[in-house]
Amino acid sequence: MSNNPQSPKNPKNEWFKLGKKSRNFLYFYLALLLIISTALSCLLIYYKLELITLCNIEKVSILGCIIFALLGSSIFYIRKLYKACINLDIVEPSSNEDHIRQIGVISYYTLRPIFSIGLGVLLFLSFKIGVSAMVKSPELNDGFVYSCMFFSFFMGYSSGDVIDKLEKVGKSIVKKSFDSTDE
């Protein structure tokens, strides 16, 4: 039994086509997002009180959701990329179809961190709705900011799973909303 990375035994080799320049671009892009989001997260934590005084808790919470979702997503997709390299799951494109697949792989890795930003904002909205539903006039404190940052990190880190879940839930909601109750 051959352990050849080009072997059809590895199903990832069927679609995971990525050339050297593309891999280098993705490493640079994801590392840059990681560095920026790490720096911004440290600044946000350090200057949180000043930012709350300057803006308000809600704006700082939204910012925290965005930054920490981006941080989590960057970590996850860098890890996913280097594991694919270590496991030899990535194959150089050799045909026109492979180059089309490469565009898909590049899009996947470049857009997922951006999707995580939207998911972070969605998390903020869900927290805000939850607090508003429980309390008549909510007085938020810095614990709300920390909660947003903490859970947003995991939302970004697990953005692929969240997107899959949203697709299932979204289809269910749309189906229920537009199904006719008239018989």
Image: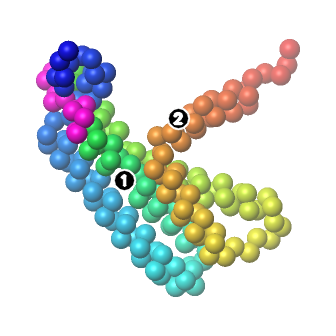
Asked which quadrant contains residue 57, the reply is bottom right
Q: Residue 182: x and y, percent? A: 85, 19
For the residue carrying disc 1, how many other residues have a C-alpha within 10 Å: few (<14), some (14-19), or many (20+)? Answer: many
Please name the residue that numbered disc 2 is placed on: 164
Residue 89 located within the stretch drawn in magenta: yes
- On screen, residue 140 versus residue 164, left or right, reads right
* Residue 43, above or below 104: below
Q: Is residue 38 among what the camera can see?
A: yes
Question: Which residue is situated farthest in the front direction here?
Answer: 1
The verdict on residue 139 being magenta is: no
Question: Which range is magenta?
Answer: 85-96
Q: Residue at x 60, y 59 (%)?
A: 124
Can residue 102 be seen here? The reply is no
Of 72 and 95, nearer the camera is 72
Give the residue number, with chain letter if any, for mark 1.
74
The CA span between labels 1 and 2 is 18 Å
Q: Residue furthest right?
A: 183
Sequence order check, earlier mark of 1 and 2: 1
Say which element carries label 2.
helix
Depth check: 89 or 100 in front? Answer: 89
Query: Residue 109 has which mark?
Result: none
Question: Could you tell me residue 115's position as x and y percent?
Answer: 45, 47
Residue 84 placement, left or right of 159: left
Rendered residue at 37%/66% (across/down): 38
Percent across and percent down for residue 40 are 40, 70
The local crowd at label 2, few if under 14, some if 14 to 19, many if 20 or more residues have their Cα within 10 Å, is: few
- Snapshot quadrant of residue 3: top left
Q: Quadrant of the C terminus?
A: top right
Question: Mark 2: which amino acid?
Answer: Asp
